[in-house]
Image (cartoon, grey):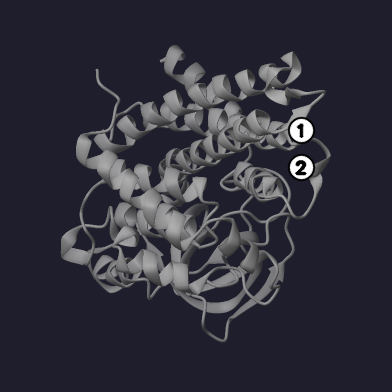
Amino acid sequence: MNFDFSDDQKSLKDEARKFLTDKAGAKVTRTVLNDAAISYDKALWKSVAEMGWLGAAIPEEHGGLGLGRLELCVLAEELGRAVAPIPFSSTVYFFAEALMLAGSDAQKAAHLPKVASGETIGCFALSEGPGAPTAASIQAKFDGSTLNGVKIPVTDGDVAGWAVVVAKEGSGVSLVLVDLNQAGVTRETLKTLDPTRGHAKLEFKNAKAERLGAAGQGWELSEAVLDRAAVLLAFEQVGGSQACLEMATDYAKNRYAFSRQIGSFQAIKHKLADMYVAIEVARSNAYYGAWALSTEAAELPFAAAAARAAGSDAYYLCAKENIQTHGGMGFTWEVDCHLFYRRAKLLALQAGGPAAWKEKLVKRLEQRNAA
């Protein structure tokens, strides 16, 4: 079994890296970080839309490129490497995936072309406060035409125009599609460790909404969306981890102490070796997830959980050790290490923390073995 990307996918990766090196990077991320009035870079968002990245996995009949999930994985890794300050994951991994998974023909025709063009920013609203949400804990209510309740935190909920919301409908749970620019919706921007990826509290009071998918199947659909997003987020985490390793290695080669490169000291060697091993474990699991996602294999729930857990662990380790390798400078505002640390901490919590995904993996394996 060959898990490697094809030559065309590798070419796409090279072009994406060149594009993001020119259009994104630490300078663009810092521009968003330094301005509390904005939470994403509009110029980069427009450029990414013009490149067709937002519609990479969206079928051509709905305005996308129809390339598939493997190409989306390639782009995700490069966006993670660049710490790109745009609502790509919320719109593409969650909102568009939910529409493609559960939307009617009319809903797909109405929304997917606008996602592909960059006109619509979307988000996925599941959490309702501390703790991992469950089907029994959901409090937001949908009565067939209106939505009431509170969702917090919602990634990119401060800038999104539309949301897919997980809500109670009768005794079951459904997914509902909500226009966030209506009178029944209020937003409150939240402060997080990484202001370059905005978060908000969304409150719905008799907001007009429509069901996405069948009534009562919302929790199963929500889990399916999370599994798909977990694989793509894992690639962002691998990209960020690799960037941290390269930063730390470059610094260790060029920083001298006691007339020696600091990279010649055993303590630094061990840090870099640990980072490399963690990345290779995360990359292997991400590739396994990519295969399962692109082939719609029955193993996707297991591969997604493993990729998510390994990616979160690797990115946190690499971001932390990158700071340690830079020594006292690594803690300063002027050095870019903190951009990756902020993103590593935030990505580890988006779509559920690593502990929750490890528990999912164990439960899924236990259920499979018991069957």
Taking the image as shown, residue 178 lies to the left or right of residue 28, namely left
Crowding near pointer 1: few (<14 within 10 Å), some, many (20+)? some
Count how many numbered circles sit on residues in the image. Answer: 2
User: Circle 1 is placed at which residue position?
Assistant: 324
Disc 2 element: helix
Residue 1 versus residue 99 in the image, above or below: above
- 329 or 86: nearer the eye? 329
Q: What amino acid type should be assigned to the residue bearing mark 1? A: Gln
Amino acid type, residue under disc 2 in the picture: Gly
Q: CB under 8 Å between callouts 1 and 2?
A: yes
Return the residue at label 2.
Answer: 330
Q: Residue at x 42, y 27 (%)?
A: 303
- Horizontal side of 66 relative to 260 (left or right) equals left
Nearer to the camera, 135 or 162: 162
Residue located 54% across and 33% down the image:
311
Image position of 218 (left or right of 51): right
Question: Measured along the vertical axis of the image, is residue 324 above or below residue 113?
Answer: above
Q: Residue furthest front?
A: 259
